[in-house]
């Protein structure tokens, strides 16, 4: 089960609660704001959160992390380049946005890390490092269930901005190619749009299928 939790710090962002219906254990992805609202959804669903997973370190994706780490008693995890985003209002954009804050105590991981629910190994997310929007941008992919949480790398009908600190057009193009090599039916859950699929966005942007080449 995936519950989308729209939250607002200065603008709306999608947090996600992904859990196993049978065991009621899961992961929380990108809790950007409104910790009490997110906690209410978790409690209503009767879910035990095993870890907070962060697609990248921008302030609108991490704003509720300190409160939720404490309330849930679980760690947050971010790609290793993201630690500097969590530690700096400049890098995480909270400073330029007028609400400076930092996040302490997060774990880091590298490309290829796998996060699995101890209660159900079918609920497993592989971390794909997909920089471009930020240096730490990550897509969490579950092959078995055909889903991916892609943060701000790709949206329904758009791709991530690259003009923020650490953004890189070439890196983003490479990362999009990596995402678009996932199966076409993979559903993409982004930070700021309705869900879409790999096939829909790959076709829109003109990326070839795996094994094909552009003319």
Image (cartoon, rainbow, N blue to C red):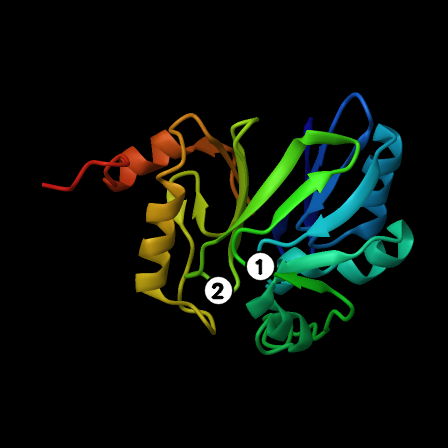
* Outermost residue, left side: 215
Question: Is residue 144 or residue 43 the one in the foreground?
Answer: 144
Q: Position of residue 63 (x, y in %)?
A: 72, 60
Give the x, y percent position of residue 80: 59, 66
- Residue at (70, 47) in percent of width and height: 7
Residue indicated by mark 2? 134
| Residue 117 picture quarter | top right
Extreme top residue here?
22
In the picture of the structure, the residue carrying the numbered disc 1 is 56
Q: In terms of secondary structure, where does tag 1 sit?
A: loop
Residue at x 46%, y 70% (from the top left corner): 164
User: Disc 2 to disc 1, how far (Cα)?
Assistant: 7 Å
Residue 146 pos. (x, y %):
52, 28
Q: Nearer the viewer, residue 50 or 59?
A: 50
> Going 83% across and 54% down the picture, which residue do you hit?
68
Residue at figure coordinates x 47%, y 74% from the top left? 165
Discs 2, 1 touching: Cβ within 8 Å: yes
Q: Which mark is residue 36?
A: none
């Amino acid at each position: 089960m995936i519950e989308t939790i729209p939250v607002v710090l200065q603008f709306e962002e999608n947090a996600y609660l992904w859990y196993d219906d049978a065991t009621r254990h899961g992961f929380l992805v990108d809790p950007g704001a409104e910790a009490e609202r997110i906690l209410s959804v978790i409690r209503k669903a009767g879910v035990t959160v095993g870890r907070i997973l962060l697609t990248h370190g921008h302030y609108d994706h991490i704003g509720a992390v300190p409160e939720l780490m404490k309330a849930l008693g679980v760690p947050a995890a971010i790609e290793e380049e993201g630690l500097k985003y969590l530690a700096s209002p400049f890098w995480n954009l909270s400073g330029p946005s007028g609400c400076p804050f930092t996040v302490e105590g997060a774990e880091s991981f590298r490309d290829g890390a796998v996060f699995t629910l101890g209660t159900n190994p079918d609920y497993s997310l592989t971390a794909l490092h997909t920089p471009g929007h930020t240096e730490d941008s990550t897509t969490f992919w579950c092959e078995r269930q055909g889903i991916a949480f892609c943060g701000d790398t790709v949206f329904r009908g758009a791709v991530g901005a690259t003009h923020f600190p650490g953004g890189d057009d070439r890196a983003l193009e490479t990362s999009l190619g990596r995402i678009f090599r996932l199966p076409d039916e993979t559903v993409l859950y982004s930070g700021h749009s309705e869900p879409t699929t790999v096939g829909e966005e790959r076709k829109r942007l003109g990326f070839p299928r795996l094994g094909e080449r552009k003319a």
